[in-house]
Amino acid sequence: MKPHTLAGIGLMLAGIALFSINDALGKWLLTSYSVGELLLVRSAAALVLLAPFLRQAGLAAFTRAPRPGLQIARVLLSTLEVAMFFWAVSYLPPG
């Protein structure tokens, strides 16, 4: 097997694991915090992790993105999806 194939498999497994951890952590934290607080902490943590990449890419990466209206719609819909997911989870009975 080629090294790129192994790297792809490893990154896919890591991504699945991180999404699972994110869901479990979010569900656990919703027992103590509101959806808004959870989204704020989640967004701040993501910003800290992405800051080096954002700095390296520079502002041009955002201003030259194709179809800026669709990019803004994607961000808004993605944010709404996450908020609605955690809002729905907050109504599940503890178990």
Image (cartoon, grey):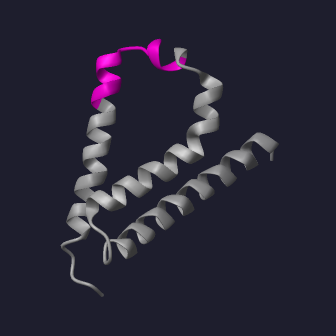
Q: Is residue 83 left or right of residue 26?
A: left
Residue drawn at x 35%, y 61% as measured from the top left: 38
Q: Position of residue 52 (x, y in %)?
A: 64, 36
Q: Nearer the viewer, residue 8 or 35?
A: 35
Total numbered labels: 0
Q: Nearer the viewer, residue 76 or 51?
A: 51
Q: Position of residue 4 (x, y in %)?
A: 76, 40
- Against 63, is 53 above or below? below
Q: Position of residue 29 (x, y in %)?
A: 38, 72
Task: Classify the position of the C terminus by image quarter.
Answer: bottom left
**Residue 56 in which image quadrant:** top right
Q: Is residue 55 left or right of residue 25?
A: right
Residue drawn at x 27%, y 85% as measured from the top left: 94
Q: Nearer the viewer, residue 92 or 44?
A: 44
Residue drawn at x 18%, y 73% as measured from the top left: 91
Query: Residue 72 magenta-drawn?
Result: yes
Q: Position of residue 81 (x, y in %)?
A: 27, 48
For the record, the magenta segment spans 61-73
Query: Residue 70 magenta-drawn?
Result: yes
- Against 64, is 5 above or below? below
Residue drawn at x 56%, y 63% as measured from the top left: 17
